[in-house]
Image: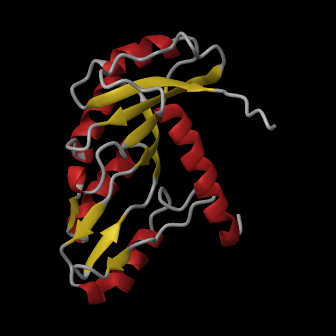
Amino acid sequence: MPTRYLPLLALLLGFTMAACNSSKKDDAAPNTSRCTEYVAGDVAVGIKATADIDAVFAWINSTGLHISQVNGFTYVSGLPADSLAYVNRTLLAKPYLDARGFKAGNAYVLAADRKIRVGDVLFDMTPANQADWLRTRQTLQLADEGAARCQSCKDIFLKVPVGVEKYWAQELARHPATSWAELNCIGQIVLH
C-alpha cells in the first residue's frame, strides 16, 4: 500500500475503534447482545494501561489463543536521541512490524523531552515473534509508557476457534488486565 494512504487508513481505523469504544462500559463484561454479525474467529480485548506486554503475552499464551494484532503499547527508549536511525533500522528488520500495509520504523524524537518514542503495531505475535519483541525491547531500552501516554489505548485482537467467540469474549473479560472484551462486530455505515 502506498504510504500516502496510511493517514486515511489510520483515520478510518480511528473512527472504527471510536465507534466500538463508545459502547464499552467500565466493567469488563462484554456486551455481545447488540452484535448480531461479527467476524468469525475474532475477539478484541482492551488492555489496562498499567499492563505490560510481557504479562499480556504470558496470559494469552496460557489460553492457547493466537495474538493477531497488538495496538497502543507505546515505549520510551533509554537510548540517546541521536540513536533514532539505529532504532528505526532495528524496527524495520522485524517482519511482524512491517505487515498489512503498515510500515515499521515509526520511532521519533519528542521535542519536549528529546526522548525516542516507539509505537509500532505488532502483527502475528507467535511465541517466536513475542520472544523476539521482548529481546528487541531490551536492546532498544524500551520502557512501556503505560498510563502516562493513554488510559485506554492498548488493545489486542485474538484468533479464537470459530463458533466460540462469545465464550472467549466473556472468559477474557474476567482477566485482571482486561478493561473490555468483545466480538469483532460487523457494522453498517449509513450515509445521509
Q: Quadrant of residue 85?
A: bottom left
Residue at image coords 35%, 21%: 172
How many marks do you count on the picture?
0
Residue furthest front in the image: 192
Compare residues 192 and 44 and report the one nearer the observer.
192
Image quarter where the C terminus lies is: top right
Image position, residue 50 (x, y; %)? 20, 43
Compare residues 154 and 188 and report the one nearer the observer.
188
Residue at image coords 26%, 62%: 137
Applied colour scheme:
secondary structure
In the displayed structure, does residue 21 sit left or right of residue 127? Answer: right
Position of 26 relative to 53 (above/below): above
Image quarter where the N terminus lies is: bottom right
Residue at image coords 34%, 42%: 152
Q: Is residue 15 visible?
A: yes
Q: Is residue 100 visible?
A: no
Residue furthest bottom in the image: 82
